[in-house]
Image (tube, rainbow, N blue to C red):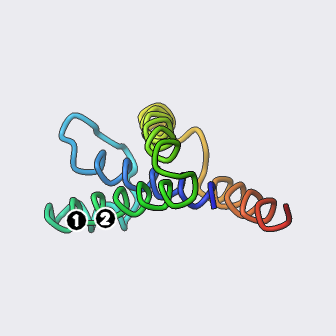
């Protein structure tokens, strides 16, 4: 569950960063290019994912711990998105593989 919550935070931050004029990606994925064409769609998806992530954090951790975890997850997601994503240090296949491994570990434990 924590992996899914963090993934929602990461995706929402990437969508917020998608419309930023200061961030210039050399090879932006096709799906992000299509979403960036429509400003309202981009922000609705970003805020929707952020709201779902916050609500899931509160449901999973409780009110106080969930809000605190939300702040920590959001800061971590922002730092990783700004540092890693535009430079293509990690390929999408490896990220998807890590996500699958972490989901599997969560289901096993």
Q: State the residue at coordinates (64%, 54%).
A: 95
Mark 2, other Cα within 10 Å: few <14 / some 14–19 / many ≥20: some
In the image, residue 11 sits, relative to residue 83, either above or below, namely: below
Q: Which residue is mark 1?
A: 44
Helix, strand or loop status at disc 2? helix
Query: Foreground residue, 101 or 21?
Result: 101
Query: Foreground residue, 63 or 32?
Result: 63
In the image, residue 104 sits, relative to residue 61, either above or below, namely: below
Give the x, y percent position of residue 109. 85, 61
- Alpha carbon of mark 1 to alpha carbon of mark 2: how far? 6 Å
Q: State the residue at coordinates (27%, 68%).
A: 34
Locate the N terminus and report the quarter of the image it occupies. bottom right
Residue furthest front in the image: 63
Position of residue 86 in the picture relative to residue 60 (left or right): left
Give the x, y percent position of residue 72. 49, 35
Q: Which residue is mark 2?
A: 48
Q: Please tell me in which quadrant of the rendered image residue 33 appears.
A: bottom left
Give the x, y percent position of residue 30. 37, 65
Helix, strand or loop status at disc 1? helix
In the image, residue 81 sits, relative to residue 27, either above or below, namely: above
The answer to whether mark 1 and mark 2 are in CB contact below 8 A is yes
Mark 1, other Cα within 10 Å: few <14 / some 14–19 / many ≥20: few
In the image, residue 8 sits, relative to residue 26, either above or below, namely: below
């Amino acid at each position: 569950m924590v992996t899914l919550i963090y993934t929602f935070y990461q995706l929402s931050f990437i969508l917020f960063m998608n419309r930023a004029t200061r961030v210039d990606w050399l090879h932006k994925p096709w799906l992000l290019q299509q979403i960036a064409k429509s400003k309202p769609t981009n922000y609705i998806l970003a805020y929707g994912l952020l709201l779902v992530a916050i609500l899931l954090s509160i449901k999973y951790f409780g009110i106080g711990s969930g809000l605190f975890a939300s702040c920590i997850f959001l800061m971590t997601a922002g730092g990783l998105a700004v540092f890693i994503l535009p430079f293509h240090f990690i390929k999408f296949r490896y990220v998807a593989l890590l996500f699958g491994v972490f989901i599997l570990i969560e289901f096993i434990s």
